[in-house]
Image (spheres, rainbow, N blue to C red):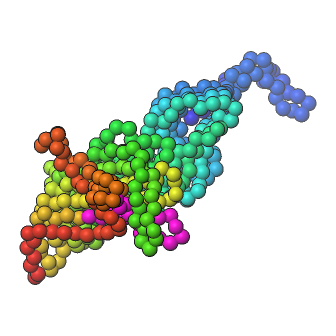
Amino acid sequence: MTDFRRPKRRPTKRRNRRRNSHGRRLLTQSELRLELSHLPSVETLEDRRMLAADITNVSSYTQSGPLEIEIGGLTPGTSGHDQTNASTDATINGLLNVTLLNGFQPSVGNTFEFLTFPTGTLAGKFTSATGLYGFGDGSLYFDVVETATSLQLVVKELPGAADAKPTTTDLQDAFGTFYSSYFSLTTPQTISGDLLLNDYNYVRGNFTLNQRAAETVDITRTGLAPVEKEVTTLTLAATGAHSFFGAGGSYWTADTDADGEIDQNEINTNAVGFSMTDVDFGLAVMAPTTFDGSVYHAVQSNAGVTTFVGDLIDLTAHEVSVDIDGGTENLAVDLPAAVNFRSSYETSVGANDGQLAITIRTDTDPATPDTIDLSGTGPRARVTANNATLSVS
């Protein structure tokens, strides 16, 4: 932020300090020029990096680096959020970074106008963003909204989003750009991180993210007739992942020695449930193209080896699968809902044989990749296992 404080000046001789009839000192001609040269000026910003919440007025705005928006309150200014006002045109082309300050937590419907151009035009588009998702309980996010005279961050809510939420920063940023109507993931991304599904299924791995084109799917709604919706879909795929299905928090804390394995020093001894290794994982998150507050998810995890962790029970199983299909309709009640994959992706009308295939591996044979096939028809959560050995102590 430019420092507009007056520079120190060498004291003038007393005989040059002329005063008016009220006793106030008059500036000499040279002093007046010095004062005017240090007044705030309206200027074009070539690279705006906001270091504290503030209001900045410029003649025009051109982005050539990350635009940092800090939010600590509802109104523009030092006690609220950053805002840049361009009296003519604004040009954007780069990263948008959003940061919450001083524990401030936005609420649904809050709007933060961070770039205005009331008499000019806006050219360009942000390439990506960070900080749009990850605050609140996992159901809130910032949508970037462009109006005729400004760019805004609007807080929106997806009640079902908290059922399939990333808990690490890079994945949160990817979900934020997916949920915001402003962005789309045009190329696949590979991100390491953690996911929490339905508050009891933790997954850690190296995920490949893809966004599918808009498509129409059938939604099964508990107690109501099915409905069709146009959705965009974010898929996540992983192999060799770790998964935990149970209570007491995530079973593993961190791979502190970076060997790709969770050892005895890296586990949560309070966790009780199924710990799975060598997991093939697929997740689809679907959000309607016309925002209505609903979101849907479907998960399948296939584990090579599964053990039950906790007191009293010892269990080891092979060929374990976890299937979770869910979502929430934006209705007055918390209505369970899920995508019917069999009818949505059927091979012919009425065949009811459809599935959504998520590619998890192509190294064995690129012509016939290994896939996770989602084929649920409604809300469910189930675990199936073969070759299990159980003992109770």
| Residue shown at 9% from the left, 78% from the top | 391
In the image, farthest residue toward the front: 349
On whether residue 188 falls in the magenta region, the answer is no
Residue 321: x percent and y percent?
20, 64
Region of the chain picked out in magenta, as a range: 323-343
Q: In which quadrant of the rendered view does residue 374 lie?
A: bottom left
Is residue 109 visible in this depiction of the protein? yes
Establish if 192 lies above or below 274. Answer: above
Residue 179: x percent and y percent?
45, 50
251 on left or right of 338: left
Q: Nearer the viewer, residue 126 or 366?
A: 366
In the image, farthest residue toward the bottom: 393
Residue 70: x percent and y percent?
53, 45
Establish if 58 lies above or below 185. Answer: above
In the rendered image, the quadrant that contains the C terminus is bottom left
In the rendered image, the quadrant that contains the N terminus is top right
| Residue shown at 36% from the left, 49% from the top | 234
Establish if 249 lies above or below 28. Answer: below
Assign the magenta stretch its main secondary structure: strand
Residue 137: x percent and y percent?
44, 62
On whether residue 329 falls in the magenta region, the answer is yes
| Residue shown at 15% from the left, 56% from the top | 278
